[in-house]
Image: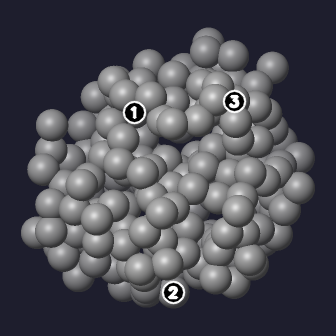
Amino acid sequence: MADYNKAYFDWLESRLADPGIYYGIATSLYRAFSDQWPLLEVGCGRGYITHHLINQFGLDQAIFGSDISAYAVGNPVTSALANKLIRCDITKDRLPFENRHFNLVFSWQLLEHMPDEAAAYRAIDEMSRVAGFLQVHSIRVLESGAGEDVTHTLIRSRDWWVLSFRNAGWFIDPGAQTRFENTGNWADTKEILVMRRQ
């Protein structure tokens, strides 16, 4: 397993050209899916997006985050997240919620870190009643040939992800996909997958 420690997050944050991107993502999520709470962010890191959803939109009772990194969960971006972030390796551990507790499970740049696609399906399927929102950074990494993050181990095309999730019972939701894309100035919307269980 990759070591998602302080050095990793320092490196990650040093490469972030616009820290405001997290506010933009949170705003887009709220505008597109305001009827889909409660919500779980899988792979939340230090809670950047979770923080903005709670701070800007008052979703304190309706959102939680989980991450594999003990460092990230133990060092959230604000102390107010201390009881909102849960350390969990979703490839082998269960989150402390009932099955399908959340209406929406979302991740931002998570899937390319997974050891295999089955782990991703399981986490979304167990926790989400209806919808899953995923942004797969590796699509851009694959097509651009850029891949500085050595923790990106599952590099696949968009078509591969769409087919794999379809085989697991999850399908692109065209209406919700368009609704989310229309809420932000996304450089490359083919990285975004908004899916619904069939």
Is residue 136 shown above or below 183? above
The quarter of the picture where the C terminus appears is top right
Residue 24 in sight in this render: no
Quadrant of residue 99 in the image? top right
Rendered location of residue 75, percent (x, y): 29, 72
Q: Residue 100 carries which label?
A: 3
Left or right: 11 with respect to 88? left
Residue type at numbered disc 2: Gly
Which disc number belongs to residue 20?
2
Secondary structure category for the residue under label 2: loop
Given residues 6 and 159, the one toward you in this image is 6
Q: Which residue is drawn at 39% across and 33% down?
A: 90
Q: Is mark 3 on a helix, strand or loop?
A: loop
- Distance in Å between CA atoms under marks 3 and 2: 31 Å
Q: Mark 1 points at which residue?
A: 90
Mark 1 and mark 2 lie on one chain; the one further toward the N terminus is: 2
